[in-house]
Structures are given as C-alpha cells and as structure tokens.
Image (cartoon, rainbow, N blue to C red):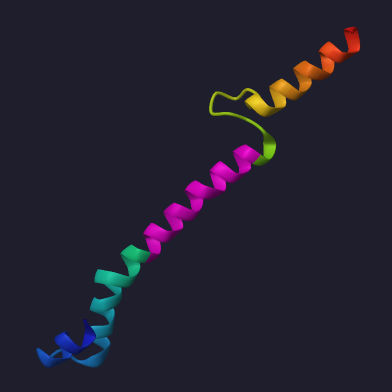
Amino acid sequence: MMIVKMSQGWNRVRAATHAWTVTAAPMLYGILVTIAGFVIIGLRRTFGFDRFGGYSDAQHTDSHSASQRQYC
C-alpha cells in the first residue's frame, strides 16, 4: 500500500498514515472486537451462567444429582 502511494507522489509519512488508516486500523479494531467476544464467552463458561443468567446445564445436572443422592 505504501509503495503504491509513494509511486503516486505521496511522501513517506503521508503514505504510512494512509496505510494505517485504510488497512491496519480496521484490522486492529476487528481483532479487538473478536477478543472481546471470546472473553465474554470464556467468562460465561468459567462462571457457569447461560445467556439468561441461570446456571448452565452441566452445573444444574451436577447439583440435581447431588440432591437426589442425599434423599436416597
């Protein structure tokens, strides 16, 4: 990208700024959004909550079977 702009007569700083604005910045923002999405998923699985705020199936099943074992 920079080589093309410099061949069009742009100076090095302006070509670098354009390359950052057009290609690198959007990729960086996309990566940050992706990371934020996976962090949310990871925290949800770590703390055992589904999207409605309750317990996940694995924890619910474990606690349910433990309570059944008490009464047997």
Residue 29 location (% of width, % of height): 38, 60
Image point (62%, 43%), residue name: 43
Q: Position of residue 58 (x, y in %)?
A: 67, 28
Query: Residues in magenta?
Result: 28-45
Location of residue 67 by image quarter: top right
Image spot of residue 5 (x, y percent): 15, 85
Q: Which quadrant holds the C terminus?
A: top right
> Going 15% across and 86% down the picture, which residue do you hit?
4
Whether residue 38 is in magenta: the answer is: yes
Number of dots carrying numbers: 0
Q: Tell me if 5 is positioned left or right of 28 in this view.
A: left
Relative placement, left or right, of 21 versus 42 is left
Q: Is the magenta stretch mostly helix, strand or loop?
A: helix
- Foreground of the two, 3 or 9: 3
Q: Is residue 18 left or right of residue 50?
A: left
Q: In which quarter of the image is residue 57?
A: top right
Above or below residue 11? Residue 51 is above
Indicate yes or no whether the magenta region holds residue 5. no
Q: Quadrant of the N terminus?
A: bottom left
